[in-house]
C-alpha cells in the first residue's frame, strides 16, 4: 500500500467514523430546579417521555432548589462532553461564567420555562417558556365570549410580586380595559394555594351580598380555583353555574372539577417544555438551523367537554 | 500514634476507592476537567470548612457560616452595583464586618458562658435576616473586575482549568494547616478542645483564643462569600442555605472528633473532595436522584462517627491494660 492510498483509506475510515458518530444518539444533560410542585415533577416526567420518543439519552440532575447545585451540574455536563445542556434556572442571575464555559466547549444551552438575566444572550441558544401575559389574556377572552361582555369578576391573585401573578393579572386586565361591561369588583392575593384561595373567596362572597353580585371568579392558578369552588359550595351556591370559574395551569384536579361541572375553563401552562426544545436542538444539530431566541409554548384553553379524557391523560404525570 | 491517624487513613481510603470506582465506570471521569471542576465548585464550601475545622477542634460549632456567605454575596452586590464602591474596598469591608460578627459571637460564648450552638444559631438568623433586609431580589454583579477575575485560571493539560477560586481554596487550606500545626494559636485550639479546664490551668489564654476561633470562622465564611460571589457574579439572599451542615459533614468525615481536641485540616480537605465526588458521580450517572448525595453523605457520616467511637473506646481502655502489665 502506497502512502497515498494509506492516507485515502485513513480519510475514508475517518469519514465513516464521523458518519457513525452522527448517528449515535444525542446525549443531553438537564439541570432541573427540583420537584417542589406537581407541575415541575410533570415537566421532568414529560421531558423523559419526549426524550425516549426521539431516542435521546436524557440525563437529569435535580438541584434541590439550589443554584450552586445547578452550576455544579452544568460544569459536570460540560466535563462529560454532552451534546447539549438544558437548564431550568432557579434564579435569573449568576449564570454568565458557567454558561461561558459551556460556550467555550461548544455545547449549546437551552433554557426551559424560565429565562435568565444576562447581558450576553449568545450564552444560550434559545429559551422555551410560556407567555404568562398571554395566559391571562386567553382567560379574559374566554370570559368575555361566555358572558357576552357583562360580568362582575372577582380575582384571586397569585403570590404578591411573583412574575406569573403580575403577568397573569396584566393579560386579564388588558381584556377588561377594552370592555367596560367586564368589571373586576374585588381582587386579592390567595398566594397560589388552595387554603388561601378558599379563605379569600369566602370573604368575597360575604362582602358581595352572599355572592349574588358575583358573576365569575378568575384565579391565577387552578389550586386557588379549587379552593374557591369549595367556598362557593359552602355558601350554598353552584360553582360553574351561579358563579363561573376560570383559572390557569391545567393540573389534573381542575379537570376533575370541570367533569363534575364545577369549573368552566382552564388555560394550560404546558409541562412539555422539553419537547419543543428537543425539536429546535435537533434541527440545529442537523442543518445548523438557528432557532429564535424565544420559543413560546402554546397557552391552550380547555373546556369541560374534554375534561374527562384530559384528566385520564394527565393524572399519572403529576 | 498510628491509632491517631486511623480516621484520616480511613477517609483517604474512601476517597481513593471512590475515585477508582468512578474512573472505571465513566471514561470521561479521570480528566483534569473533572478535577478542576471539583476544586472550583467546592471552593466556597472548602474555605468555610477550614474555619469550621478550628471551631470543631475547640469543641464548638458554628451554624452561621451559610448565612454569612449569603450576607456577603448580597452585601457585595449592593455595594458594588448600587453604591458604586470599588470591589476590593467592598471585599475588605465585608471581611471586616464578618470578622467583627464572629468576634462578637465568640465573646458571647466565652463571657456569658452560652453554648456555641445557641449563639451561632442566633447568628445564623441574624445574618440571613440582614441579607433579606438589604434586598430580596437577586442582583447581578456586572463590574468588569468580576469578569477578569473569573478568567484568571491555570490551564491544565487535557482542558481542565484551575480557577482563581480553586487556588484561593488551596491556599486557605495550606494556611490552615500551618496555623493548626505550627503556631501557638493552633496548639491552644487543640488544648481547649482536648480539655478546657486543664488548658486553663496550663495558662492557655481561653478568652483570646475563643474569640479568635469564631472570628476566624466568620472571616473565612466571609471569604467563602466573596468566592461565591465571584462564582455566580450575583448576590442572592437565599444562596448557600445549609452550607454550614455540609461543612460540618466534611469536617467529621475528614476525621475530626466532634467533641474536639483531635483532627486535621487536611482531613477536612479530603472530606470536601469526597462530598464533591459523590455529587459528580450522580450527575455523571444522570438517572439517580440527587438526593442520593445526602443519603451517601449520611451513611458516610454515620460510619465515621461509629469508627471514632470505637477508636476512643479502644483508647481509654489502653492505659488500663498498660497498668495491668
Image (cartoon, coloured by chain):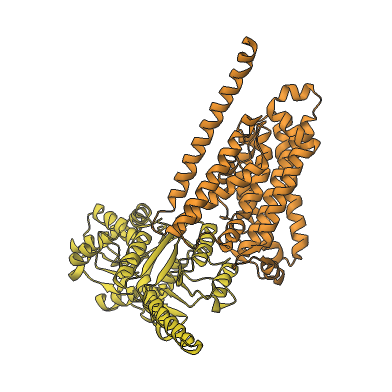
The residue shown at (79%, 28%) is B204
Q: Chain A is drawn in which colour?
A: yellow
Q: Colour of chain B?
A: orange
Q: Is residue A122 in view from this perspective?
A: yes
Q: Front-most of A267 and A202?
A: A267
Quarter of the rendering occupied by the N terminus of chain B: top right
Q: Front-most of B285 and B141?
A: B285
- Residue A162 x/y as whole percent: 48, 64
Q: In terms of image quadrants, where is residue B152?
A: bottom right
| In this view, A127 is above or below B309 | below
Q: Specify the farthest residue to the top.
A: B324
Q: Front-most of A294 and B203?
A: B203
- Residue B255 x/y as whole percent: 60, 37
Q: Is residue B72 in view from this perspective?
A: no
Q: Specify the farthest residue to the bottom.
A: A4
Looking at the image, residue A76 sits to the left or right of residue A54; the answer is right
For the image, the number of numbered tags is: 0
| In this view, B187 is above or below A214 | above
Looking at the image, residue A154 sits to the left or right of residue A290; the answer is left
The residue shown at (58%, 57%) is B38
| In this view, B219 is above or below A134 | above
Quarter of the rendering occupied by the C terminus of chain B: top right
Q: In terms of image quadrants, where is residue B82?
A: bottom right
- Residue B7 x/y as whole percent: 58, 35
Q: In terms of image quadrants, where is residue B267?
A: top right
The residue shown at (54%, 47%) is B16
- Residue B171 x/y as whole percent: 72, 53
Looking at the image, residue A210 sits to the left or right of residue A29; the answer is left
Looking at the image, residue B210 sits to the left or right of residue A311; the answer is right
Amino acid at each position: 500500500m502506497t502512502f497515498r492510498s494509506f492516507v485515502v483509506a485513513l480519510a475514508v475510515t475517518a469519514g465513516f467514523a464521523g458518519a457513525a458518530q452522527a448517528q449515535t444518539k444525542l446525549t443531553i444533560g438537564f439541570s432541573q430546579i427540583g420537584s417542589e410542585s406537581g407541575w415541575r415533577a410533570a415537566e421532568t416526567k414529560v421531558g423523559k417521555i419526549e426524550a425516549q420518543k426521539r431516542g435521546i439519552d436524557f440525563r437529569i440532575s435535580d438541584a434541590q432548589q439550589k443554584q450552586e447545585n445547578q452550576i455544579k451540574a452544568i460544569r459536570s455536563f460540560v466535563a462529560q462532553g454532552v451534546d447539549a445542556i438544558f437548564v431550568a434556572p432557579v434564579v435569573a442571575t449568576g449564570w454568565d461564567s458557567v454558561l461561558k464555559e459551556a460556550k467555550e466547549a461548544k455545547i449549546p444551552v437551552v433554557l426551559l420555562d424560565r429565562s435568565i438575566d444576562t447581558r450576553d444572550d449568545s450564552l444560550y441558544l434559545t429559551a422555551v417558556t410560556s407567555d404568562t401575559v398571554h395566559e391571562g389574556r386567553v382567560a379574559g377572552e374566554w370570559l368575555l365570549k361566555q358572558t357576552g361582555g357583562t360580568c362582575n369578576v372577582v380575582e384571586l391573585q397569585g403570590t404578591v410580586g411573583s412574575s406569573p401573578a403580575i403577568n397573569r393579572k396584566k393579560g386579564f386586565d388588558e381584556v377588561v380595559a377594552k370592555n367596560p361591561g367586564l368589571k373586576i369588583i374585588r381582587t386579592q392575593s390567595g398566594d397560589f394555594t388552595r387554603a388561601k384561595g378558599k379563605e379569600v373567596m369566602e370573604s368575597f362572597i360575604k362582602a358581595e351580598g352572599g355572592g349574588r353580585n358575583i358573576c365569575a371568579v378568575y384565579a391565577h392558578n387552578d389550586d386557588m380555583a379549587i379552593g374557591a369552588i369549595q367556598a362557593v359550595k359552602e355558601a350554598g351556591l353552584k360553582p360553574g353555574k351561579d358563579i363561573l370559574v376560570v383559572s390557569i395551569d391545567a393540573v389534573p384536579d381542575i379537570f376533575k372539577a370541570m367533569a363534575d361541572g364545577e369549573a368552566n375553563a382552564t388555560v394550560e401552562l404546558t409541562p412539555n417544555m422539553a419537547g419543543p426544545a428537543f425539536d429546535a436542538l435537533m434541527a440545529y444539530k442537523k442543518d445548523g438551523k438557528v432557532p429564535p431566541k424565544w420559543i413560546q409554548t402554546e397557552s391552550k384553553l380547555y373546556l369541560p367537554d374534554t375534561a374527562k379524557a384530559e384528566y385520564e391523560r394527565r393524572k399519572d404525570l403529576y | 500514634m498510628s491509632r491517631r491517624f486511623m480516621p484520616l487513613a480511613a477517609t483517604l481510603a474512601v476517597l481513593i476507592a471512590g475515585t477508582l470506582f468512578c474512573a472505571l465506570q465513566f471514561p470521561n471521569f479521570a480528566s483534569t476537567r473533572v478535577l478542576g471542576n471539583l476544586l472550583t465548585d467546592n471552593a466556597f464550601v472548602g474555605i468555610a470548612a477550614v474555619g469550621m475545622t478550628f471551631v470543631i477542634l475547640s469543641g464548638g460549632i458554628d451554624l452561621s457560616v451559610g448565612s454569612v456567605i449569603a450576607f456577603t454575596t448580597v452585601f457585595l452586590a449592593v455595594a458594588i452595583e448600587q453604591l458604586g464602591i470599588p470591589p476590593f474596598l467592598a471585599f475588605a469591608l465585608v471581611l471586616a464586618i464578618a470578622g467583627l460578627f464572629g468576634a462578637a459571637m465568640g465573646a458571647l460564648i466565652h463571657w456569658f458562658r452560652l453554648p456555641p450552638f445557641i449563639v451561632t444559631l442566633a447568628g445564623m438568623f441574624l445574618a440571613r435576616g440582614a441579607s433579606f433586609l438589604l434586598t430580596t431580589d437577586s442582583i447581578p454583579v456586572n463590574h468588569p473586575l468580576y469578569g477578569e477575575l473569573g478568567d484568571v485560571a491555570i490551564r491544565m493539560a487535557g482542558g481542565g482549568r484551575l480557577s482563581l477560586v480553586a487556588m484561593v481554596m488551596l491556599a486557605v487550606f495550606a494556611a490552615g494547616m500551618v496555623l493548626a500545626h505550627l503556631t501557638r494559636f493552633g496548639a491552644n485550639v487543640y488544648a481547649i478542645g482536648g480539655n478546657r479546664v486543664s488548658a486553663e490551668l496550663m495558662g492557655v489564654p481561653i478568652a483570646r483564643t475563643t474569640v479568635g476561633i469564631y472570628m476566624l470562622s466568620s472571616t473565612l465564611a466571609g471569604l467563602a462569600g466573596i468566592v461565591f460571589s465571584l462564582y455566580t457574579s450575583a448576590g442572592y439572599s437565599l444562596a448557600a442555605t445549609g452550607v454550614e451542615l455540609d461543612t460540618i459533614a466534611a469536617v467529621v468525615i475528614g476525621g475530626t472528633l466532634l467533641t474536639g481536641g483531635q483532627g486535621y485540616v487536611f482531613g477536612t480537605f479530603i472530606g470536601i473532595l469526597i462530598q464533591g465526588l459523590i455529587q459528580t458521580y450522580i450527575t455523571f450517572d444522570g438517572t439517580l436522584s440527587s438526593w442520593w448525595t445526602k443519603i451517601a453523605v449520611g451513611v458516610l457520616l454515620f460510619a465515621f462517627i461509629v469508627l471514632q467511637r470505637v477508636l476512643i473506646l479502644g483508647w481509654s481502655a489502653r492505659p488500663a491494660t498498660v497498668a495491668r502489665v
